[in-house]
Amino acid sequence: MILSFLSNLFFSSTLAQVISSVLQAKTRLSLFGEYSYSIPSFSSQLASEKTYDILNYALFILIAGVLLWFNLKFRKKPNIWLDTGYFIISFFFYLQVHFLGYSSLTIVIGFLAFQVLFWVLNSFSPNQSRTYTTRVFLNSIFLSVSTLLIVRQFNYSLILPFSALVIVPLIYYYSHDKISRLLAHPFHILLIANLFFPSSLDKLLVITLTVLIASWLTRNINILRTETLSKHVYPLAAIFLIAFNPMYYLGTIDSVEEGFWLGWLNRIIHGEILYRDVWVYHPPLLIWLLGLFSKVVGASVANVRLYFHLLQILGFWVFYLVICNLTPSKILRALVTGLIIAFSFTLVKNNVEIRMASGLLAILGLYLYWQENKLSWLIITGAALGISIFTSVEVGLSAFASILISLVLSSRVQNLFKTVSRLGLGILMVATPIIIFLGYTKSLTPFVNQITYYSHGFSSGYFNLPIDKTETLPLFKWGSAVEFFTSSVWLWDLTRIILISGAVFAFYKTYTRQGTNEDKLAFAISLFGIIIFRAALGRSDWYHLLFPLWAATLILGYLAGGMWGQRPWGQVVTVLAFVLFFSKDLINLNFMTQQFYKWQSYGIFPGTYSTYTSPRLDTIVSSEVDTSDFNDLIEFVDRQDPQRPLFSFPWMPELYFITRRGNPTKNDTPYAFYSPDYQTMTVAQLRATSNVLIVYNPEMKFSNMSPDSIAILKKYITDNFYPLSRFGSYIVMEQRQKI
């Protein structure tokens, strides 16, 4: 079954790539409008690449769904030999379009031909008789090699030549009972002569036909401890031991990923209101909770990192609770949880784990409703959805869509209104007090404007990156494939393959075979991962891939458990599969290095290290990092009048927190609020404030954006401010005197 699944998914990926390339080339299709081209650093090339990525993904989902459903619905009893052959051919198709030039028409026709052949062979039921001998098998190999040499005369592709090595043995296998004497005929050995004429089509055809005819004519010649503790408490404690990093305070500030949190936290500490007094592009729950956490434990960079690190571990706990309900296998639970933690150890300073976990927690609430059939669980599910939406908009909306679809499919028509209304009630229980507070503080309208502005910009190309693609070559090189399958690039395809497999498999079991609640849960998570994949199709980097990748990892555990169950050999195969596909340097170097290092030092940094002079910047960095320029900058700013406002450009929001200074504008993150309107408003706010100190870093880039990307704001600063002092790449500027 799993080979048939993978075969269809490889074919789906191939066809999606071919069709999307043709559509884009023929129609010059673009999914981005005029607004996209107003975004700094956006280009027609990026629009073309992202259109292809989105179109390719949509077609993959469509084609894979159709193929998988068809095979599950209409196939006869699976045959390991046919499935293996079908898988090998689909894999050759996949390699062809990724690594070699190809004809789109040839790919489509070839797929249809092989699909028809697959259906025809599937309709046969060969008997395992004694007539299928080693000699029959070897004869099929001799003929397949000859066929390969003939087909190779027409192209240098992978599909047709190497498919002969699969198709001919399969035909021999399925036909051996009917024409056993021909297929076992020793004259097949003469086909080896073809090896001496690999470039002569005429000779190859003559020799092959002569041998086969002679074999046919002479075919009749006979010479020739408590359960609760062991199930929950101990695993959660073990996760904490593995995931907790006592050196969470180590490392330089990542201005892009943690700087904006520090800037917004500084606003809260000074009594300012988010969205009203500062432009914010994230929903409020995480930053509100960060403000509360800082009041309790103190405001410092190390404590901010501790806050997000604890949320990270909380996210791991949620992942574990989900996988516990997807598979009873303790081995699979451990593998999936360990893999999720290993993936995450490539990032330490972000909040991706808790964001993703908030959506999964809502889906888990839906599962508990199915388990206990109590409407109160739907209210709890809705409340969890509300929390998720105000934690991460894209995660919350993706979870909402997957829950709503799953709920509609699983509910009776007469109960649909009751179930959906309970879900909505739960959402309102969380959303209402937040909306009231935003309205009371006059920040509701700014909240809606800023969140929708950023979401619209992101979906329109802001900070978008294309998915990495392979380089096509005149001849296939195995090294290119190895490099591809051992890199994170492969994970893009693998993620969507697993998600669509889980969705189709779980849907089929649930709605055609009276599947379990676990199958319903798997379908909801798969659907959630498929939808959240859209976010990864925008900025296609490792950080955004993690969103659907974690969902896919959970579904991989479900699929492995469903296909192999508790059988020992299945567990061994599963472990080997996990090691084969996921033991990458990208993951395990960071993860294993930190584990060994942690248990040797456990929070005590050995040797020498560099520090910062600011009390709030209570972190350390490796001795190789030069902190002198940054320290000198902070000391210089601290010597200025405490009431003197500071503005950092183009993106250093952490400076406001470290120096405890106010920003005379509402714009802590100029790269995010890049539009001409926002730039003009920022300029007006700067012009209305006197004695502003500017910290300008011309080398500070954000992805493909530079200070030139926000030209209006840059021009005002360079025209009206002059350099006062310089510390490395940091230029401190003050306002020119008006004449």
Image: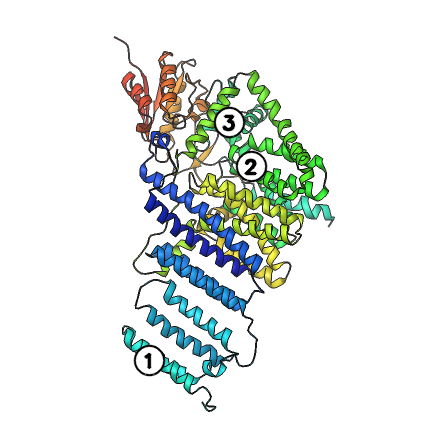
Please give the residue where the numbered disc 2 appears in the rendered image: 354
Please tell me whether residue 283 is drawn above or below residue 185 in the rendered image: above
Residue 89 spot, x, y in % from top left: 44, 63
Q: Is residue 705 visible?
A: yes
Residue 382 spot, x, y in % from top left: 63, 33
Please tell me whether residue 422 is drawn above or below residue 487 in the rendered image: above
Q: Residues within 10 Å of mark 1 (few under 14, many from 20)?
A: some
Quadrant of the image containing the N terminus: bottom right
* Disc marking residue 207: 1
Q: Image check: 283 left or right of 727? A: right
Q: Quadrant of residue 329?
A: bottom right
Label total for image: 3
Q: Residue at x 40, y 54 (%)?
A: 484
Check disc 2 and give the amino acid type. Answer: Ile
Furthest residue toward bottom: 223
Element at label 1: helix
> In front: mark 3 or mark 2?
2
Q: Image check: 594 left or right of 424? A: left
Check disc 3 and give the amino acid type. Answer: Ser
Is tag 1's residue or tag 3's residue first in the polypeptide sequence?
A: 1
Please tell me whether residue 390 is drawn above or below residue 606 in the rendered image: above
Q: Residue at x 45, y 86 (%)?
A: 219
* Disc marking residue 406: none
Please give the residue where the numbered disc 3 appears in the rendered image: 300
Is tag 3's residue or tag 2's residue first in the polypeptide sequence?
A: 3
Q: Mark 1–mark 2 contact, CB under 8 Å?
A: no
Element at label 2: helix
> In front: mark 1 or mark 3?
1
Q: CA distance from mark 3 to mark 2?
A: 21 Å
Check disc 1 and give the amino acid type. Answer: Ile
Furthest residue toward left: 739
